[in-house]
Amino acid sequence: MNQSEEREKSMETANQTPIYMLIAVGVIVSMIGVFLRFAFDSTILSIVSWVILFIGAFICCKAVFKILDAK
């Protein structure tokens, strides 16, 4: 396989729709966490919102690493 074919295959893998949907889900989950963080003043809700925020960030990072690892 020559270099241009390999690059084209990598681009196809990196531009798959499910990867970008995963980023969108991660951003939405993170936004919910941020909203809950500032919506109410409760220690338990604040901890839960931080957990939700980190889950959303983890989902986004997972999708970005899928794009970077596309070969």
Image (cartoon, rainbow, N blue to C red):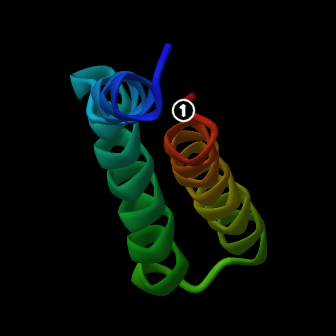
Question: Few, some or many C-alpha atoms within 10 Å of disc 1 (few <14, some 14-19, many ≥20)?
Answer: some
Task: Report x, y in % for residue 42.
Answer: 66, 78
Which residue is at a point 39% across and 60% down the rendered structure image?
32
Q: Secondary structure at mark 1?
A: loop
Task: Please say if 34 is above or below 24.
Answer: below
From the viewer's perspective, is 60 left or right of 7? right
Q: How many marks are shown on the rendered structure? A: 1
Task: Report x, y in % for residue 59.
Answer: 58, 43
Task: Report x, y in % for residue 37.
Answer: 54, 78
From the viewer's perspective, is 40 left or right of 50? left
Question: Foreground residue, 37 or 5?
Answer: 5
Task: Report x, y in % for residue 5.
Answer: 35, 23
Residue placed farthest to the top in the image? 1
Which residue is at a point 38% across and 46% down the rendered structure image?
23
Q: Amino acid at mark 1?
A: Ala
Residue placed farthest to the left in the image? 17
Which residue is at a point 47% across and 61% down the rendered structure image?
30
Q: Which residue is mark 1?
A: 70
Question: Foreground residue, 68 or 38?
Answer: 68
From the viewer's perspective, is 13 left or right of 37? left
- Quadrant of residue 52 in the image? bottom right
Task: Please say if 31 is above or below 41.
Answer: above
The C terminus is located in which quarter? top right
Question: Foreground residue, 34 or 67?
Answer: 67
- Quadrant of residue 14 in the image? top left
